[in-house]
Image (tube, rainbow, N blue to C red):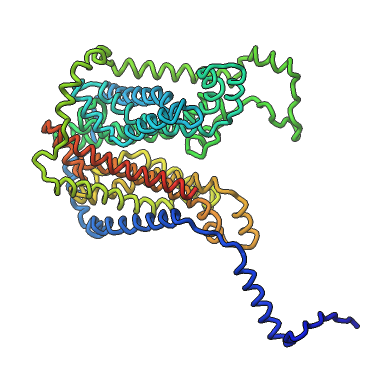
Amino acid sequence: MSTVTRTPARPGAPTTAGSDTEAEKAEQEALAARAPRRRISPERIAAALTIVALLVASVFALAGIGINPAKMAQSWSNAERFFGRVGAISFPEPGELLYLTGLTLGLVICGTLLAAVISVPVAYLAASNTTPGNAWRAAARFVGVLTRAIPDVVFAMVFVLIFSLGTLPGILAIGIHSIGMISKLFADAIEQIDEGPRLAVRAAGGSRMQEFTAGVLPQVLPSWIATVLHRNDINLRGSVILGYVGVVGLGMQMSFAFKSLDYGLGLGYAVVIFILCVIMELVSSAVRAAMLGIAPTGRGLGDRMLRGIRRGRPVRAGAQTGAGRPAPTATPAAALEAALRRPWSRGRIRTAVWGWLAVAVVIGSILICDIAWGDLATVWAKIPAIAVQFWPPSFGSYDVETMLGAMGETIAIALAATLLTLIVSIVVGSLAARNVAPSPGVRAGTRFLLVVVRGIPEIILAIMLIVISGLGTQAGTIALAIGGVGLLGKLLADSFEEVKAGPERALTATGASRLQVYAGATLPQGTRALIGNTFYMLDTNIRCATLLGIVGAGGVGYYLLNASQGSNYGTVTAIVLMILVTVLIVEGLAMWMRRVFR
């Protein structure tokens, strides 16, 4: 028979069970009241309210644009009549098409490389751990923000005015505009390096240049090459719109075909551009892996294709041999000898071949562009006379209310498109993530869909939608939303795949469903990246909405093109300043959000 030991009651304390329960509850409440509570900073509250305000503004913008799927379905007859007039899609002569394709690729490659070269010193000065001083860092950051904020089509307008037609305006426009994004990503990579090698070179008496070449460059080179390849893909899609302002290549020929109502030929050029963009997207990962001599570890379609066909890679240091046994470690003397006399293995030969092939592509790009180098020496005398035409800024024959309304329309298009992109990308990006997709087949299919969508230039989408729904903001909004899904969906998928697996496994172990794991672990961890990528999408959409207005998709771009074609360059400056202020505000909000929610 067991005995129960009871704790003697305190004198005067109640002895009933109900009273004990109440006492314990009161004690727990007292402990909870004394427990430290996490204070929510006012800045975090302000950031959350700002996000809510932007969401509300996006909803109102979307409602104001009035996208009506039923009405668009009824307007499909417009598309049928259009394609009836088009007839069969036609292409130029093979020789001409090959030359225009090579010219477009060469122009884009030269512009991207120009930006990459200039971005190295800009990034060095902008990085907090390599800059000589705060003034240098602020100046370099300002250069990056300024070149990123001004659309490349505006640079192209100016350079076409200076150099007239040719490849040089396109190369300079692509190059200078790309400095902003490439230098920013270069600087971010420099700030994330291991400081040990750089400080070791400094301790040994090395110069700043030796610190950079031996302590910084080897660490950031893979990230830099990936950044340049990614920017090259973006520049290829952006080169289409440059054709509308006089930059040679496939974009210019497509604009000529549409303006002359030769729709079959125009669609033929559009098909070629689409194929080029998809191929560039697929090849980028393979080129990066081959040039660096590293295994393709990315999640893109190109990486997966390369992993499937690459064989025969020699075992690296630290790899496992046999039945899980580590490879034998060489002596220091042998390791030094091997480093001084590297054998020409298959991996080294492959890397050398791809490296020389890359050099050949660059040389070929320069040759096919046929750059008039002499113009770079004589252009300086023209700049003062041309600069006078752009200043002071003026709205010309347009009143202030009209121009501000057009800029507001551009912002509304960007907000509405970003909201639609965000809604669709959360679903599509989740299905493209390895840890969320219900099966590998669903993930692979969704990833391929994102590649295809990302390969379609927004201007081509806008032209097709204008045919269906007519001129206005509706076509521009839908075009930006569809194009944005390709980019934001990929970024969100990568972010979801990179979350910590611990919380997901913990919920799975408790018997949670796939949806509960996603809602309770995956999505909360990816929220920070979701906010940052969405602001990046909004920033991109504001610039793109300006460009789509050139082809009649609404917004201030229509007035920008008219001012340029009418030589009203003071109006061009005024519009650019409005765009610049808007982009800087969005960029400031994005930087603030990243700092608050990090």
Q: Nearer the viewer, residue 219 or 294?
A: 219
Is there any visible trace of residue 280 in the rendered image? no
Give percent across and percent down for residue 250: 26, 29
Q: Nearer the viewer, residue 394 or 579?
A: 394
Rendering quarter of residue 183: top left
Q: Nearer the viewer, residue 522 or 119?
A: 119
Query: Image check: 582 left or right of 390?
Result: right
**Is the residue 412 above or below the residue 123 in the image?**
below
Residue that appears at 43% across and 24% down: 120
Q: Nearer the viewer, residue 548 or 52?
A: 52
Query: Image check: 212 left or right of 153?
Result: right
Give percent across and percent down for residue 397: 8, 40
Residue found at the far left of this picture: 397
**Is the residue 62 above or below the residue 260 in the image?**
below
Give percent across and percent down for residue 166: 23, 21
Is there any visible trace of residue 158 in the rendered image? yes
Residue that appears at 35% across and 19% down: 365
Give percent across and percent down for residue 474: 23, 51
